[in-house]
Amino acid sequence: MERKYFIDNLRWMAILLLFPFHASQIWSGGEYSGFYIWSHTNIVLYLFSTAVYPWYMTLLFVIAGISCRYSLQIRTNRQFIVERIKKLLVPFLFGLLVFVPVMTYIAEVFFNGYTGSYFQQYVLFFTKETDLTGYHGGFTPAHLWFLLYLFIISLTAVLIVLLQKKYFHRFKADNLPYFCIVFLFVPEWICQYILNIGGKSLGQFLILFLFGYYILSEESILEKLQRYRFVNLILFIASGCLYTYLYCLENVRNIFMDGLYIFYGWTGIITLLGIGRSKLNFHNRFSDYLTRASFPVYIIHMPILVVAGFFILRLPIGVAGQISLIVLISFAATFLLYEIVKRIPVLRFFLGIVKKRL
């Protein structure tokens, strides 16, 4: 089976985008809109973070679904489940105990004037009443919610695939017309309201994973996305401009905006897959390195970025200087830490770092 390198490349590119995205959260929305530290609202960074959010995490779930399809072609269900435990569940639990309290400690100090020790904060972490965001302290899965959701969804998908093969073994989606692919945003929109916890819907991400597994992994579908990539790009840009304008500048919040949010995110996914298949189906030492590093970097980057932001906000260098410094320092420190931990067997295990690319 020939490896589709553009899937790997889209994954690590999306994860690297998290550095400027999460840094921009420091200047997005209001003080209580959500991040572990906050400066003030900068309209450019608010527009940027709003424009990125609808498609970058949804893309990762679709890519995970596509990768699951390819993975199950060369692994048994048992091998796949054991692999998911090692790569997702173990790093989630480790990160929850080791990395997440770093961010909630910073939030306690920044917003609440906390003066206790770092380890005393662990008591607050497990006992304080919280909304599960942790943005003002208290328990939260933080950015590791992605690992937990992906683990649950992966196991659910294995069960769904088993049932499908038993009862609908002739199911194929390789002849789906282009306009039907575009309108797949409708079932995603409906599923957005299922098990929606703090704005992160298990129903939405499960159906995106299944779209990746059953539809977007088909070569004929990917060929259509490549063929119509410029049409998709127009839909993506137009819907993105409208959504970002209404959300940020007009403060519109209604069911129409929910649909526009889903449509914008979905057109972003199919646009990036089409362009990726056309332009990103390559590999070299640089891309192979980032492919292997992407998940550990995702786990490690956030506490480093929050700590860097906490101190850099004190520097009188303006917003442009502050965000540039936060991104550069957190990027460099994250990859330095990754290079250290991947050489320590026990930490490599806890961060789900494998010797072979999956």
Image (cartoon, helix red, strand yellow):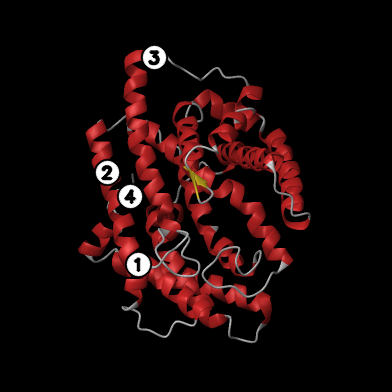
In front: label 3 or label 1? 1
Q: Residue at x 57, y 67 (%)?
A: 23
* Residue hosting label 4: 88
Q: Are marks 4 and 3 in contact (CB under 8 Å)?
A: no
For the residues labelled 1 and 4, the Cα–Cα distance comes to 25 Å
Q: Amino acid at mark 2?
A: Glu
Q: Residue furthest front?
A: 129
* Residue hosting label 2: 83
Percent across and percent down for residue 15 are 49, 55
In front: label 4 or label 2? 4
291 vs 196, left or right, is left
Q: Which mark is residue 311?
A: none
Q: Are marks 1 and 4 in contact (CB under 8 Å)?
A: no
Give the SS element for disc 2.
helix
* Residue hosting label 3: 168
Q: Which mark is residue 127?
A: 1
